[in-house]
Amino acid sequence: MTMDEGHNRRWNCRKVFLNSIILCILLHVDKTHSFVVIPIIPKSTPSPSIQRHDFQYVYSACNTHIKSTDPDTDTNTDTTDTENAYEYDDSEAESQFGTKEYWDEMYQGYGDFSSEEYSWYFGFGTVKPYWMEYMPNALLPPKHRDSDDNANDDSDGMDNYTNMPKILTPGVGNDPTLLDLYQFGYKDITAFDYSRDAIERQRELLEYDSSDTGGALEDIKLYVMDARDLREQEIASASSASASENNDDDNEESSVSWTDYFDIIFEKGALDAIYLSGPEQGNVQLAVKELTRVIKPGGYFMSISGVVPEKVRREMFHADKGWEWIRDGSDDLKAGVFVWKRNEKSESEV
């Protein structure tokens, strides 16, 4: 091969390559009507320090296992199926979110999210409009209640409510929601988590902000508990309270029994994490059964959830189990805002 032949061959190769690029650009322009070529950049995991708002899904680690079927983000989605907002890989998600060790490490500062404080899904500021719309007047903080007794009021079964509603927040983690609820006007707040490190972190949050909130640390009750079985901790708490107050032994358990005790249950992602601890083991069903036991007839349950399958949720909060659906959040853009009312006990529960 002569030098001229080699030069010509290299030039022909370059022409083929350049023609290929030009063809790709022309195809791009034909499809997008624009000469701007958007670079393909791997999607990075959002920093946990970024405050999430609205319906932005904040389980960034779980996002690696969940495929959005939102028609706004996935043009290949069949929008006729809206029963579930997400498809996910149970096996991988379970390994991360379904173990106590994972959460302990996170609250110790070794996890995927901030160990300081982390508001799951979105903050109370986003939840507040739903809260004001769906909570009956009697269950709002006194300063937010409408003077008109008929406004936003579902008065059936409300005669036994005290002036300050009792709120339970299961699986609270290091979410600042407790302070938000306290500043909103609720003063009788109880929360628990099965991670002792989470409760210690929550105490630190309350202690740090106590001066601004006017005593939240003293007023908010925190426990290390497992949502699947609350009775054991109730008895232990009763014994401790009895010893400190010199109560009679006969009154130990009844003094702190949570059966039909709470007016409101508010959870953000707790049921999702429990579900991922083992769908086949029925853990989330056990947790909902216990939460059903401790809420008063007429009480309200608000759940911020994006993982529990709709079929499972429908079975757990079925009318036969004493629940009335007030708001179906399955069509929300990201995590759903679900609201249920606890009706009178069913015959099977009496």
Image: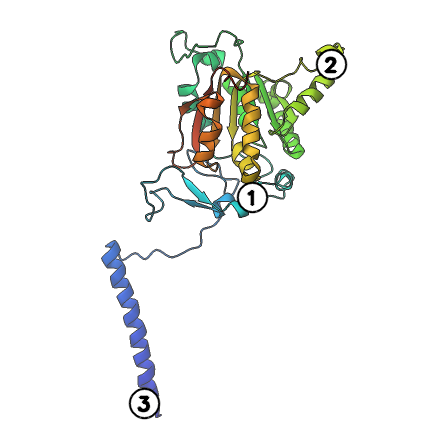
Total numbered labels placed on residues in the image: 3
For marks 3 and 1 on the same chain, the one whose residue lies earlier in the sequence: 3
| Image position of 236 (left or right of 7) | right
- Color scheme of the displayed model: rainbow
| Image position of 7 (left or right of 266) | left
Q: Mark 2 sits on what residue?
A: 242
Mark-to-mark CA distance, 2 and 3: 101 Å
The quarter of the rendered structure image containing the N terminus is bottom left
> What is the x, y in percent for residue 179?
55, 24
For marks 2 and 1 on the same chain, the one whose residue lies earlier in the sequence: 1
Q: Mark 3 sits on what residue?
A: 4
> What is the x, y in percent for residue 5?
32, 89
Q: Residues within 10 Å of mark 2 (few under 14, many from 20)?
A: some
Q: Secondary structure at mark 3?
A: helix
> What is the x, y in percent for residue 163?
53, 9
Q: Secondary structure at mark 1?
A: helix
Residue 94: give its label: 1
The quarter of the rendered structure image containing the C terminus is top right
**Which three-letter amino acid code belongs to the residue tagged 1?**
Glu
Specify the quadrant of the image occupied by residue 333. Answer: top left
**Which three-letter amino acid code belongs to the residue tagged 3?**
Asp
Residue at figure coordinates x 40%, y 39% from the top left: 85
Mark-to-mark CA distance, 3 and 1: 65 Å
